[in-house]
Image: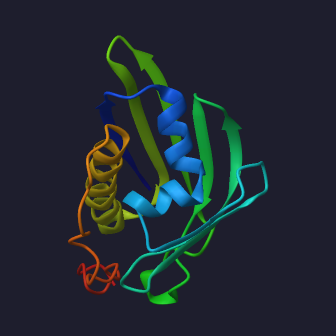
Amino acid sequence: MKLVVQELDIAAPPDVVFRLLTDPAEFVRWMAEEAVLDPRPGGLVRWTHANGDTCCGEFVELVPGRRVVFSYGWERAEVGIAAGSTTVEIDLVPTATGTRLRLVHRGLDGPMAGAHDGGWRHYLERLRRWAVGEDPGPDPFATVRVPTPAELGSG
């Protein structure tokens, strides 16, 4: 198993970034077409991208303005990451200019870690833009399906 680790500085306070990660009305502005987020331990985390792929899991830990942890996986079986089978930890640390966001995605195998590393980089940049009042624009990944292990040469 590999870790996916992303760090990003955002010129917005941690409370704003936390809201963008847990409020479905905000979440759909930067991540997905549809989202159901019930931000409490055991609450549903489910979003569907424009390409039809859906992530699903549940919140594990929430510390307002500081930390969001949820289980994660895909409903499309051929992706090979079952709903809720991996864990995403997001820590928000206040800085002089806003927030340092650190994301750690645990439980991914080989090439799927690389694919998710690129995906998280893409979506966290969209989050950063939305948090500072910029329109992230149309999602260039909107028509791109999540790759399968076979498509990445490992299946």
Q: Where does residue 32 sit, x and y in percent of width and height? A: 43, 69
- Taking depth in this image into account, of 81 and 47 the one nearest to the observer is 47
Q: Where does residue 113 sit, x and y in percent of width and height? A: 35, 60
Q: What residue do we see at 29% from left, 67% from top?
A: 111
- Taking depth in this image into account, of 43 and 148 the one nearest to the observer is 43
Q: Residue furthest top?
A: 96
Specify how the rendered protein is coloured.
rainbow
Q: Is residue 71 left or right of residue 102?
A: right
- Taking depth in this image into account, of 20 and 111 the one nearest to the observer is 20
Examine the rendered structure and indicate whether residue 115 appears above or below residue 126.
below
**Quadrant in the picture for residue 102:** top left
Examine the rendered structure and indicate whether residue 130 appears above or below residue 37.
above
Q: What residue do we see at 38% from left, 29% from top?
A: 12
Q: Is residue 93 left or right of residue 126?
A: right
Quadrant housing the N terminus: bottom left
Examine the rendered structure and indicate whether residue 102 appears above or below residue 82.
above
Q: What residue do we see at 60% from left, 73% from top?
A: 83
Q: What residue do we see at 26% from left, 56% from top?
A: 136
Q: Where does residue 72 sit, x and y in percent of width and height? A: 57, 63
Q: Where does residue 52 sit, x and y in percent of width and height? A: 43, 86
Quadrant housing the C terminus: bottom left
Q: Is residue 155 left or right of residue 87?
A: left
User: How many discs mark residues in the rendered view?
Assistant: 0
**Quadrant in the picture for residue 73:** bottom right
**Quadrant in the picture for residue 31:** bottom left
